Amino acid sequence: MKILGIESSCDECSAAIVEDGKILSHIIASQIPLHAKYGGVVPELASRAHIVDIVEVLRGAFKEASVDPSEIDGVAVTQGPGLIGSLLVGLEAAKAFAYARNIPLVGVHHTEGHLLAPLLDTAQGMAKPGFPFMGLVVSGGHTNLIAVRGVGDYESIGQTLDDAAGEALDKVGKMLGLPYPGGVQIDRLSVGGNRERYQFPRALPQHDNFDFSFSGLKTSVATQLRKMGSMPEGQELADLCASALEAVVDTLARKTIRAAKKIGAQTVVVAGGVSANRRLRERLTEDCKNNKILLSIPPLKLCTDNAAMIAGLGQYRLRSLIESGAKFDAFDLQPRPGWRLV
């Protein structure tokens, strides 16, 4: 079964072709240069860029896979959550392709795609996860702890009450005058920094609380910058970046391990854009080893928003629909920008 996946939930336009769990092609058109001068994603510009990019991205996916469009058995597309204008572009492209070829169409959940991405591929030295596992979905828009007992069998264990982890790091980066995306720059600068120089807050530290809050971190960094009186540079900047990043990573790691123990999971899966963060990978590798828990993280190419994870999940969904005799999604499929997984 060859599945065409399309992802356009935010600022990455992506298409991929997956055959029976193997990625044949994987094309991403990033909009980072477009949004960098604004310090964040501008929704209207994002949707316009998707319109410009979508056809060439699709052509690239077919060319890389050496697959003819007539060989595609089904189309999977991100239905939500995300920016409504961006979602619409991907949805309309998917509907048009499926309608023209008279093949099945299925809309899938973006967060679910991230959760199951390691079933397609994992970082070097890591095994594909078995069920049940504790999933940490952490990105610019999501910070969730989700118990995964099987495909479609999920339980929410914890979530952010305000900013997502990636969003908070990007905003801290903006305060420091770093280029967009700030979280990536903070990770880079923190390598030579002292993580203990500044004691930034860890919100909701209670042992039985699995929710997250990162708004206090932004306030604390802003307060520290006012005390300094000038923008930090050199080692001082590296120390501040390392300390801010450690506040986020420490909170994510501690709560994830506790949540895994709560449900009796032997595996932790980390997915989403922030799963590419060097320090988060380092800390969770150490904590999982100390607690005799397996760690499974996708390779870097599957950490950020991508269509391969959408095609992989779509394959599960389409096979399930075929086996049960249920109907495929209709061609009037609509975007669901605020769609909750659980």
Image (tube, helix red, strand yellow):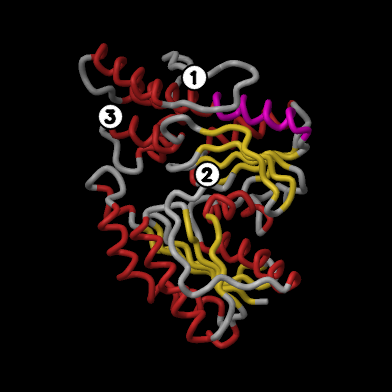
Query: Which residue occupies the foreground of this view, 119 or 27?
Result: 119
Magenta-span inclusion, residue 254: yes
Q: Residues within 10 Å of mark 1 (few under 14, many from 20)?
A: some
Instruction: Identify the magenta region.
Output: 250-264
Q: Which label's residue is closer to the chain start, 3 or 2?
A: 3
Q: From the viewer's perspective, is 169 left or right of 26?
A: left
Q: Give the number of callouts.
A: 3
Magenta-span inclusion, residue 234: no
Q: Read off the residue under disc 3.
A: 175
The Cα atoms of the two marked residues, 3 and 2, are separated by 22 Å
Q: Residue at x 71, y 32 (%)?
A: 260
What amino acid type is highlighted by mark number 2? Ala
What amino acid type is highlighted by mark number 1? Ala
Mark 1 element type: loop
Q: Which label's residue is closer to the chain start, 1 or 2?
A: 1
Q: Residues within 10 Å of mark 3 (few under 14, many from 20)?
A: some
Q: Read off the residue under disc 1.
A: 203
The Cα atoms of the two marked residues, 1 and 2, are separated by 23 Å
Q: Residue at x 55, y 24 (%)?
A: 250
Where is residue 50? Give x, y as percent.
34, 65
Q: Read off the residue under disc 2.
A: 276
Q: Which label's residue is closer to the chain start, 1 or 3?
A: 3
Mark toward the viewer: 1 or 3: 1
Mark 3 element type: helix
